[in-house]
Image: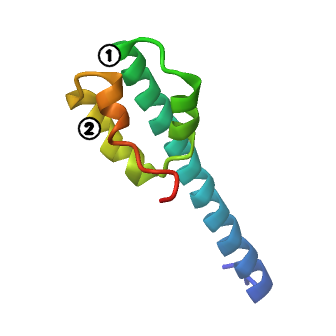
């Protein structure tokens, strides 16, 4: 078994954490793209202002909104479920 110094162990831990963070960000971006696809499929073209709002969502907010897009009757109704920019 190879000896690993504390500096090497620290570097490996840091690399793992950075990898997890990149994975979470990639997952969030995929969820937002899915949300945009669902919105486009249900309601047609999504205005740029709404796309910009969606781009700033957290993963938790995105998950909630996926449910909302499936139950909303219009894009306007869906928009009422968006978190305010002050959140």
Locate the N terminus and report the quarter of the image it occupies: bottom right
> Of helix, strand and loop, which one carries label 1?
helix
Seen in the picture, residue 64 relative to 10 is either above or below; the reply is above
- Residue 79's quadrant in the figure? top left
| Residue located 50% across and 47% down the image | 57
- Residue 83 rendering spot, x and y as whole percentages: 41, 49
- Residue 9 rendering spot, x and y as whole percentages: 70, 80
Question: How packed is label 1: few (under 14 Cα within 10 Å), some, or many (20 or more)?
Answer: some
- Residue 44 rendering spot, x and y as whole percentages: 41, 11
> Of helix, strand and loop, which one carries label 2?
helix
Residue position for label 1: 42
Q: Is residue 85 left or right of residue 37?
A: right
- Residue 80's quadrant in the figure? top left
Residue position for label 2: 67
Between 3 and 34, the residue placed more toward the observer is 34
Question: How packed is label 2: few (under 14 Cα within 10 Å), some, or many (20 or more)?
Answer: few
Between 35 and 27, the residue placed more toward the observer is 35
């Amino acid at each position: 078994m190879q000896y690993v110094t504390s500096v090497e162990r620290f570097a490996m831990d840091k690399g793992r954490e950075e990898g997890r963070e990149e994975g979470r960000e990639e997952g969030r971006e995929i969820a937002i793209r899915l949300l945009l696809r669902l919105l486009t499929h249900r309601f047609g073209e999504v205005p740029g202002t709404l796309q910009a709002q969606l781009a700033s969502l957290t993963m938790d907010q995105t998950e909630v909104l996926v449910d909302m897009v499936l139950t909303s009757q219009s894009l306007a109704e869906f928009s009422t479920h968006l978190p305010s920019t002050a959140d």
